[in-house]
Amino acid sequence: MKRIKEWERYNEYLSFYPEIGLMVDISRMRFPKNYFDQMEPLMEKAYQAMNALESGAIANPDEKRMVGHYWLRAPDLAPAREITREIQKTLQAIKDFSKKVHAGKIKSQKGKPFSRMLIIGIGGSALGPQFVSDALKTSRDPIKPYFFDNTDPDGFDRVLKDIGGALSETMSIVISKSGGTIETRNGMLEAKATYQAKGLRFEKHAVAITRVNSDLDRMAKKEGWLARFPMWDWVGGRTSETSAVGLLPAAIQGIDIGELLEGARLCDEVTRKKDSRVNPSALLALMWYHAKGGHGNKDMVILPYKDRLQLFPKYLQQLIMESLGKERDLNGQIVHQGISVYGNKGSTDQHAYAQQLREGVNNCFITFIEVLRDRRGRSLMLDGKATSGDYLNAFLQGTRRALSEKDRESITLTIKQIDARSVGTLIALYERAVGFYASLINVNAYHQPGVEAGKKAAGLVIELQTKALAFLKKEKGKSFTTEEIASAIGTPEEAEMAFKLLEHAAANVDHPIKKIPGDSPFLSQYQYHE
């Protein structure tokens, strides 16, 4: 009898979107019968806010800027003809540049065609390109991508070792809107030093994606880099995949960016509908609100049953958590909103944490992403009864049922296959769902004061380190405890931070700092020692 009721609910709440190749199943979310009627006033406000956003309203008051990532796949909707022309001009420039690279008309310093590219960015400037690259890569791609997405020296070394002797035919794409993002700048300088050590000129292999007239833009122009592409103030990093940030690396790799944009454009059209029952992004936002009680009560677990989507949960972490994790609402009230997002690919999750999802603390809701097509061509029939893809599908269906049996709520998104169009659809689907949900909980999805605070704090830490090392250099040959050093530089309240910085400095050969162990770590002394 329970299965019959589930089937009836499935019939009632499964939504089909043939124009974008998507099905959305919300039947395993236990919202009440009158839920959509109850939420209609809030959704009306969400639709109005989205209309204002797409019309060019100032959506980020901190930076006094519009938010226009939707215009990237429908330039004619931009509020000014100048913006429309800029989008169209940039898209054509991306296509022309990538064609010349593939044809060997744009060559490396040694006259060789490019066969590799190194994308240097952080956050949205890396996560989007990484996700799309991994989801759509093939053995026929003309250019192989690599990424610097952190400021980890060992991470740089690992990537550069993988590139190896192909550095002379590697294009570096540096992505930073401001041109001053520390992690990106560090990656660029590390890459530049490696090129120079190999007798190569970095500028003969470099491309910049940045705001017009930024420090990076001016440097690239002065040094004569291969090309410069714009980032606009009205595109945020986490929603930049359909700008030059994502489109240029994808086009150079060999991905059909026209299809990616078309998938996003069509999804935008569907998700502009003001009927929540036929708007897939509205459905997602409403289910998030139901599951979380409007206050962040539960985590969101993303389980894509496809290897090509293994980076999608990581991509969504930034999009959702950076957009929605806010201390204050639009009225200035402290609310501490947000959604914690994590995920793993199926069926790997069943050997990782599905046990807790089913029988542990009931503090999450799950989104399954189902891909109907297993591979191109036929699959091997295992044991004469099923293919490996049949088993993957069985694990998805079995896990969905097992979770439902324990009253764990889930959403299922179904797409036919992984291609550029479906990836564009998924990106646009979640971008608008985030915007709708932000309206429901009354927060601004398009600024990130917490991230900026972390950047400022890091700058102060480096300043403290500089003072501590300068003091030790001045007192060369003498040894001091952490507390003595912190007091000597006028910051006794920063003894803990000074301890962490000195420990790090002493562990690396880059700074001539020697540690003299004491009876306890806090009694250890440090000295400048060349």
Image: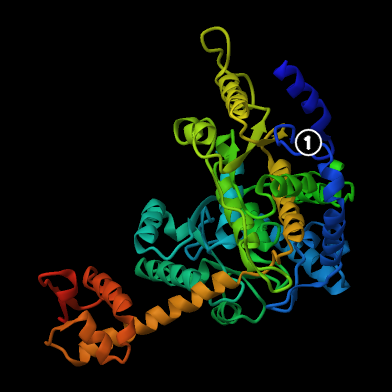
Q: Which colour scheme is used?
A: rainbow
Identify which residue is drawn at 35% across, 69% down: 197
For residue 106, what is the image quadrant? bottom right
Q: Residue at x 89, y 46 (%)?
A: 275
Q: In this view, does 377 lie to the left or right of 46?
A: left
* Horizontal side of residue 445 vs 530, given as left or right: right
Q: Where is residue 374 in the image (x, y as percent from the top left)?
A: 62, 26
Question: In the rendered structure, which amino acid carries the disc numbered 1?
Answer: Gly
Under circle 1, the secondary element is loop
The C terminus appears in which quarter of the rendering?
A: bottom left
Return the x and y of residue 61 as percentages of the image width and height: 72, 77
Q: Position of residue 519 (x, y in %)?
A: 10, 70
State whether residue 4 appears in this view.
yes
| Residue 101 at least partly seen | no
Q: Residue at x 54, y 37 (%)?
A: 345
Work out whether 281 lies above or below 249: above
Rendered position, 233 above or below 274: below
Between 378 and 71, the residue placed more toward the observer is: 71
Q: Which residue lies furthest to the top in this view?
A: 384
Q: Quadrant of the N terminus?
A: top right
Task: Left or right? Give the position of 491 relative to 116.
Answer: left
Q: In this view, does 391 lie above or below 93?
A: above
The residue labelled by disc 1 is: 21
Q: Number of callouts in the render?
A: 1
Callout 1: 10 Å neighbours few (<14), some, many (20+)?
some
